[in-house]
Amino acid sequence: MTMRNLQVLLASRPSGFPTEADFRIVESPVAQPADGQVLVRNHWLSLDPYMRMRMNAAKSYAKRAELGEVMIGGTVGEVIASRSPQFRAGEFVTGSLGWQLYALSDGAALRKVDPAVAPLSHYLGVLGMPGVTAWMGLLDMARPEAGETVVVSAAAGAVGSVVGQLARMHGCRAVGIAGGAVKCAHVVQELGFHACVDYKAGRLREDLERAAPDGVDVDFENVGGEVLDTVLALTNPFARVTICGLVSQYNATAAYPVRNLGAVLVNRIRMQGFIVSDRLEVWPEALRQLAGWHAEGKLRYFESVAHGLENAPRAFIGMLRGENLGKQVVRLSEY
Ligand SMILES: NC(=O)c1ccc[n+]([C@@H]2O[C@H](COP(=O)([O-])OP(=O)(O)OC[C@H]3O[C@@H](n4cnc5c(N)ncnc54)[C@H](OP(=O)(O)O)[C@@H]3O)[C@@H](O)[C@H]2O)c1
């Protein structure tokens, strides 16, 4: 019997928030691997904010998704047929095989993972790209010192949740910013941040001043817009601002007018953006440390799980609206 693949394609380029009509779900036969290739059955799909930018026509740091193409995305799955000397059927791999149940790969960008060490989905979160993003942006770039105050936005999400826990482990005051009282309670009670500010409560500046009474030494910025602008106003001299993401702007149709850029000059701030895939050489050490802390129970990890590939578009839009708590993943099989 021919195996059938299910794929989610980019059907149209959204203006503002995407809708489910921007995606098309199609069925096709599963192709067999050619010489040097493997066939992977994807068990889990990662949903990430960067995918929204790939849906745009505008030039960005990475290649845009073309209309009619399979949506780009990180996956974990199992090699079910191999014509590559590097992989055997039955091995588990993570890579970027897209929003689909089956994919062919030449194996070059696949990393073997072990389901006996951690649940497979964790390789899309704390033991994968988001975890490395937190590690790189905080420990390698901002380099906070014990006693400093670290603020991180989207604190209840995949990257932010790791950032705050790493900051606390390094002796810093960890202050999160998240949307809603439930998320803020989670950030403090489950993740162990010292404080969390609900940016939707309408008192961002006052609440942040109270949560960071000694000012802000490091801002790990995931959100941009008014959140970044407000944090800038509360920075200390020689603060480091790591621009990881600007998720509040990904669906915006007008640019946010930054008011507090003067703080960068007055406080001699070092502000730097980064893309985690730029420095693949630091990934092994980052993953080694993250896996150690995770295994020791020092790094807690939470997920929001959607079920079935056909529900990926809805879960993706929900994640962009803040409906996820922790890392948003899609379960594609019973594994
Ligand atoms: N530079 C890199 O290499 C790199 C790598 C990975 C991720 N990132 C960036 O890191 C950030 C977090 O990514 P993630 O994967 O961890 O996603 P996430 O935080 O798990 O999910 C996205 C979150 O963004 C928040 N959000 C959405 N719209 C917002 C708005 N208008 N204002 C404030 N918050 C808003 C929501 O949380 P609330 O409910 O709290 O609003 C939502 O849950 C994103 O900006 C992403 O692009 C960058």
Image (cartoon, rainbow, N blue to C red):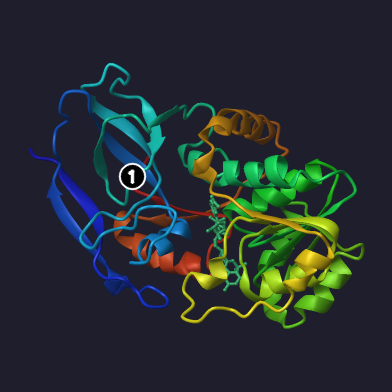
Left or right of residue 53, residue 33 in this image: left
- Pointer 1 residue Cβ closer than 8 Å to ligand 1: no
> Where does the C terminus fall, quadrant-wise?
top left
Q: Nearer the viewer, residue 313 or 251?
A: 251
Q: Amino acid at mark 1?
A: Ser
In the rendered image, is residue 128 in sight?
Answer: no
Residue extending farthest to the top is 85
Vertical order, 305 against 13 (above or below)? above
Relative horizontal placement of residue 213, taking residue 86 as reference (left or right): right
For the image shown, how many numbered marks are present on the structure? 1
Q: Residue at x 46, y 68 (%)?
A: 318
Q: Secondary structure at mark 1?
A: loop
> Which residue is drawn at the image coordinates 36% and 60% (left, top)?
312
Residue 316, image x and y in percent?
42, 63
Q: Left or right? Give the position of 146 relative to 89.
A: right
Q: Position of residue 6 (x, y in %)?
A: 21, 52
The correct choice, above or below, for 174 with respect to 229 in the image is above
Q: Is residue 328 visible?
A: yes
Provide residue 187's location: percent of width, then percent of height. Answer: 71, 58
* Ligand 1: quadrant of the figure: bottom right
Residue that carries the numbered disc 1 in the rendered image: 333
Pick out the residue farthest to the front: 265
Quadrant showing the N terminus: top left
Q: Quadrant of residue 209?
A: bottom right
Along the line of sight, the residue nearer the viewer: 116 or 235:
235
Q: Nearer the viewer, residue 279 or 67?
A: 279
Label 1: few (<14), some (14–19) or many (≥20) C-alpha neighbours in 10 Å: some
Locate residue 69: give its quadrant. Answer: bottom left
Judged left or right of residue 333, residue 137 is: right
Please state the horizontal and vertical placement of residue 14, each as a whole percent of the image: 34, 74
